[in-house]
Image (tube, grey):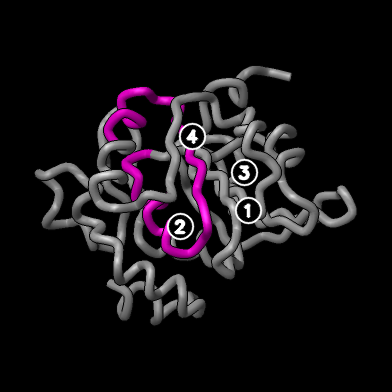
Amino acid sequence: MVVEQLESRDIRDKRVLKAMRQVPRHLFVPLSLRDRAYADHPLPIGEDQTISQPYIVALMTQGLELKGQENILEIGTGSGYQAAVLSLLASHVYSIEINATLAESARPLLHNLGYANVDVRTGDGFFGWPEKAPFDGIIVTCAARRVPGPLFEQLKEGGRMVIPVGETGEGQRLIRVRKLKGKAYEEEISLVMFVPMVGQDKKKD
């Protein structure tokens, strides 16, 4: 997986590549799909949600530019795979999942696998986790209509947010947002297709 799907493309961060080698992806997919766990495509994990393909996980993680001492906020825990990868690259990961069933499944799985620096809670990720802010990095694993204001507010000065933006069924852009002197500077990373963010983000302005 790492050689054929990541190194052969544009994943160059050696720490990210090492983490992708270490995390047992097959333990984060349903038992019936474990023979396809390392394939180059997303997989359903129940509750109308998916685990992203390995390349997208690596690409988004690389976009955070982690050095090892950061506190990270993840929006969209899913099965816990992305959080597990991040846990090997940062000091602490705070992950929010709006679907209680997924959150209650991911929490013990991460704990039992030894990812002790990950906290999972159920909630609407649009509002972030203000009690633990500010964050050095924020990663959003569902497509928002726009960059949520509360998340940008919780991003530390100089921090990075990696987030897919766009309406479902239309072109979505994976962007990196840097916070510099309180202002947002966006950089497009790739075109993507993610499940939509639900909750507050779906409410009309």
Which of pointers 3 and 2 lies earlier in the amino acid sequence? 2
Amino acid type assigned to the residue bearing label 2 in the image: Leu
Q: Residue at x 31, y 45 (%)?
A: 110
- The mark found on residue 86 in the picture is 2
Question: Circle 3 is placed at which residue position?
Answer: 165
Which of pointers 3 and 4 lies earlier in the amino acid sequence? 4
Q: Which residues make up the magenta segment?
A: 78-105
Q: Is residue 84 above or below residue 12?
A: above
Amino acid type assigned to the residue bearing label 4 in the image: Ile
Dot 1: what SS? strand
Asked whether 73 falls inside the magenta stretch, the response is no
Q: Residue furthest right?
A: 181
Q: Residue at x 19, y 55 (%)?
A: 26
Is 166 left or right of 38, judged from the image as shown? right
Q: Is residue 61 above or below residue 113?
A: below
- Judged by depth in the image, the label closer to the viewer, 3 or 4, is 4
Dot 2: what SS? helix
How many angstroms separate mark 2 from mark 4 (CA)?
A: 14 Å
Which of pointers 2 and 4 lies earlier in the amino acid sequence? 2
Q: Determine if residue 172 is in view.
A: no
Is 15 left or right of 78, judged from the image as shown? right
Question: Circle 1 is placed at which residue position?
Answer: 137
How many angstroms separate mark 3 from mark 4 (CA)?
A: 18 Å
How many angstroms separate mark 4 from mark 1 (CA)?
A: 14 Å
Question: Circle 4 is placed at which residue position?
Answer: 96
